[in-house]
Image (cartoon, helix red, strand yellow):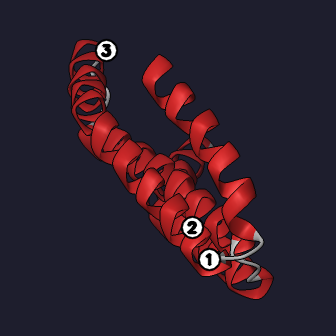
């Protein structure tokens, strides 16, 4: 984590100097940094996914629910990242559309859970 923070601070100072004369280059450098951080944390994400899978098996949670929850978390993180990068590039409308699309995808993902809750409620009610 210290490497990411250190590189981020150095890059932030560099971007302050690049944004004025070379705004397009500053955006490209920022995107490269984000891509590098994602590649750096990928092994940890794989480890985290395995841990969640093991925990779900231990507490006997149905795989579908865990899968939906993890996908929703992934969509939320990716849409937040994409919208923030769009805002940094000065594209507010694109950022809003990315956020809206992420929210819609999460709602669509949650439909099986909502249906299961509704079925359970229908069984409980006379």
Image position, residue 24 (x, y; %): 60, 80
Residue occupying the far top of the picture: 58
User: Disc 3 on helix, strand or loop?
Assistant: loop
Say which quarter of the image contains residue 86. Answer: bottom right
Q: Which residue is mark 3?
A: 59
The answer to whether mark 1 and mark 2 are in CB contact below 8 A is: yes
Q: Residue at x 39, y 52 (%)?
A: 71
Q: Residue at x 26, y 20 (%)?
A: 51
Image position, residue 73 (x, y; %): 49, 47
Q: Nearer the viewer, residue 17 or 34?
A: 17
Image position, residue 104 (x, y; %): 60, 74
User: Disc 2 on helix, strand or loop?
Assistant: helix
Say which quarter of the image contains residue 42. Answer: top left
Image position, residue 31 (x, y; %): 48, 63
| Label 1 Cα neighbours within 10 Å, binned few <14 / some 14-19 / many ≥20 | many
Of circles 2 and 3, the one toward us is 2
């Amino acid at each position: 984590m210290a490497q990411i923070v250190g590189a981020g601070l150095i890059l932030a100072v560099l971007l302050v100097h690049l944004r004025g004369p070379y705004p397009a280059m500053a955006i490209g450098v920022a995107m490269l940094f984000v891509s590098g951080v994602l590649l750096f944390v990928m092994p940890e994400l794989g480890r985290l996914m395995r841990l969640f899978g093991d925990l779900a098996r231990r507490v006997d949670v149905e795989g579908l629910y865990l899968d939906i929850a993890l996908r929703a978390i992934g969509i939320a993180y990716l849409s937040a990242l994409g919208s923030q990068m769009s805002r940094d590039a000065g594209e507010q409308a694109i950022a809003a559309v990315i956020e809206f699309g992420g929210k819609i995808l999460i709602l669509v993902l949650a439909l099986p859970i909502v249906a299961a809750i509704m079925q359970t409620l229908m069984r409980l009610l006379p």
